Image: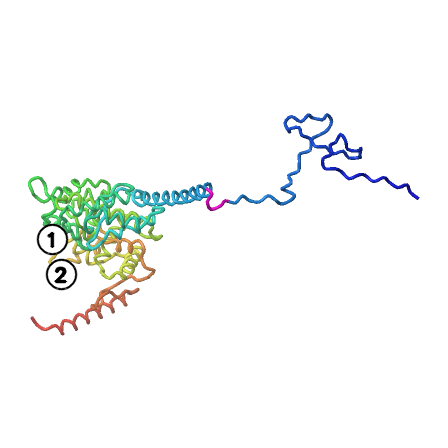
Amino acid sequence: MSKPTSETPPERPNETPSNKPDSSVEERVDTTPPDTQPAVDGVEETPATDVSLISGAAKPREYKADNQSFFMQRGYQVLLVLGLIAAFFLVMVYQTLFGRIEQPKQMVTIDQGQSYYGLLPQWQQQIPLFSATIAKLYMKTQVDGPLHAGIYQLPENPTFAETLHILGQGVKASMVKVQIIEGKTSKDLYQTLRDNKGIKKEVLTDDSGNDRDNAGIAQALDLVGILPNEVINSNDPIVNHNLEGWFAPDTYYYGEGSTDKQVLTDLYKRQQQVLTEAWENRAPNLPYKTPYEALVMASIIEKETSVAEERPLVSAVFRNRLDKGMRMQTDPTIIYGMGSRYEGNIRRKDIDEKTAYNTYQIDGLPPTPIALPSAASIEATLHPADSDALYFVATGNGGHKFTNSLAAHNQAVKEYLGVMREKKSQTPPQ
């Protein structure tokens, strides 16, 4: 039988460590403040356990609706968002009005009926964050009238605001119309400018008011290096310093008082740009050694057909003939070589006359263009159709018939003559 263990009397709440009975574990209340509690040698202090981590009493801090810090925090967030929106809007405004597009200093033609809104796509494509809405609002506040047709000089890398200001100057200027039809000659262009009272004469007449010749015009325009030596040094008055082909045909509007030098220089620059771009992207294996030779051919194509879809076919015929060493045999070159002697008809003696331009009598291309070719004819010259045709003749009903052999060509000529006889018989006598 085991010896009964004496009961431990219950602990009294007010009992202190001094009057408690001895036990294996001694509890005491330490009233010493934490920063003054003496350290015990050899005993490492263990940090006290955070009761809240065990009990789950820790919770995210919650703000009451009437807490002042809550409203301050929310206010700062709203202000930050509004600030970001305002900054983005200001960047859009700046980019729209003052963002620059990359382009060289150039003349820009505004045709009759164009509007300011037509300017927007170019800027939208090139300027990040460009806003058409902001641009339209700016136009409504800054533009007083409609866009006037004319030729305007834009600076290098212009902004939208600068462009609007420059175009707006058209309201203050009286404009004159200069119309140059495709296929007309430089001589026709010169006369058009001479007859235009709104164009001041500097180049086309000398100090005494007399008309200048080709050499005088070329010298006055100072267009150096654009003509071959055989043109500059030719003894033929038609060939010598002839600038034929170098002016882009179109309808232009200039401020009243503009000079003929300005007009001719602008038209030359436009034609040069068209020719350069087309030459750089030309088809392979063409018989033209220089852009100038392509310009000569383009002028012939321009004179041979006014039907747009026929241009590449006419180009193919002449390319094929040059490749085979055949003469071009094109009537417009006879007419140009006759100059002022041409009276409306080509006779047998005209075909047999050897001039610098008559391609029935000379091999290859004439020395200069014979007209002012359009951009479409220049493009057709450098991208001929895939065709083996060597001949073409008018049908009499519009357009031409293209054939690959002389026999087929002669038959097409007979058909053409029959159509013309039929039309003549149906025409009532005058």
Q: Nearer the viewer, residue 115 or 409?
A: 115
304 relative position to 204: left or right = right
Q: Amino acid at mark 2?
A: Asn
Quadrant (top left, top right, bottom left, bottom right) of the N terminus: top right
- Quadrant location of residue 308? bottom left
79 relative position to 395: left or right = right
Q: Which residue is mark 2?
A: 345
The answer to whether the residues at label 1 and label 2 have Cβ atoms under 8 Å apart is: no
- Quadrant location of residue 353? bottom left
Image coordinates for residue 97, horizontal then vertical, percent = 29, 44
Q: Which residue is mark 1?
A: 340
Q: Nearer the viewer, residue 341 or 276?
A: 276
Q: Amino acid at mark 1?
A: Ser
The local secondary structure at tag 2 comes to: loop
Residue drawn where x is 63% and y is 27% of the image: 35
In the image, the segment drawn in magenta is 63-67
- Quadrant location of residue 72? top left
Q: Nearer the viewer, residue 288 or 275?
A: 275
The local secondary structure at tag 1 comes to: helix
Q: Within 10 angstroms of label 1, few (less than 14), some, or many (20 or more) residues?
A: few
Q: Earlier in the sequence, mark 1 or mark 2?
A: 1
Quadrant (top left, top right, bottom left, bottom right) of the C terminus: bottom left
Image coordinates for residue 135, horizontal then vertical, percent = 28, 48
Residue drawn where x is 72% and y is 35% of the image: 14
Q: Within 10 angstroms of label 2, few (less than 14), some, or many (20 or more) residues?
A: few
Image coordinates for residue 421, horizontal then vertical, percent = 16, 71
Q: Nearer the viewer, residue 11 or 207?
A: 11
